[in-house]
Image (spheres, helix red, strand yellow):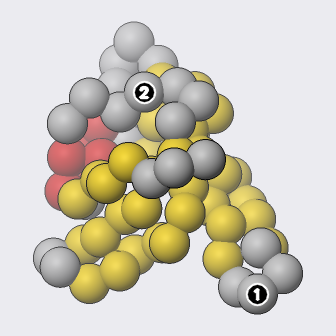
Amino acid sequence: MNIQYGKKYKIREKGSLYCERVSVDHVSSRGVVTVTMYSGAGWYSHRLDLTAKRVAELEWEEVAK
């Protein structure tokens, strides 16, 4: 899947929900994707760098803003 900067996604891992909502902050030329993950009722967030291999392991579904 082509993960794009500025888009929001829901991520699943092996069919199970991994994160309800992430926003893509950066995509490097080497395929590293920096995301902000939102979770919990208060939308607690933290940033995470995902390697190209890890990005490929996850199932990405684009969601509305």
Q: Quadrant of residue 24?
A: top right
Tell me if residue 54 comes above or below residue 45 in the rendering: above
Identified at 26% across, 29% down, the residue is 2
Q: Which circle marks residue 41 in the picture?
A: 1
Up the image or down, 58 lies above or below 27; here it is: below
Nearest the viewer among 44 and 47 is 44
> Is residue 49 visible to us here?
no
Q: Is disc 1 surrounded by few (<14), some (14 to 19) or many (20+) residues within 10 Å?
A: few
Amino acid residing under circle 2: Gln
Q: Quadrant of residue 51?
A: top left
Identify the secondary structure beneath mark 2.
loop
Please say if 15 is above or below 12.
below
Task: Judge the density around disc 2: few (<14), some (14-19), many (≥20) Cα neighbours within 10 Å.
Answer: some
Where is residue 57 shown, x and y percent of the image? 19, 56
Q: Which residue is mark 2?
A: 4
Compared to residue 14, the image places residue 48 above or below, namely above
Residue furthest front in the image: 64
Q: Is residue 48 left or right of residue 16?
A: right
**At x 29% / y 37%, what residue is drawn?**
52
Q: Residue 15's image quarter? A: bottom left
Q: Nearer the viewer, residue 18 or 8?
A: 8
Q: Is residue 8 left or right of residue 1?
A: right
Mark 1 belongs to which amino acid?
A: Ala
Q: Residue at x 67, y 66 (%)?
A: 38
Measure the C-alpha gap from mark 2 to mark 1: 26 Å
Q: Looking at the image, do the residues carrying marks 2 and 1 touch, with CB atoms under 8 Å apart?
A: no
Picture coordinates of residue 17, whole percent (x, y)? 35, 80
Give me the residue at 73% from left, 61% from top.
Answer: 46
Quarter of the picture containing the N terminus is top left
Mark carried by residue 19: none
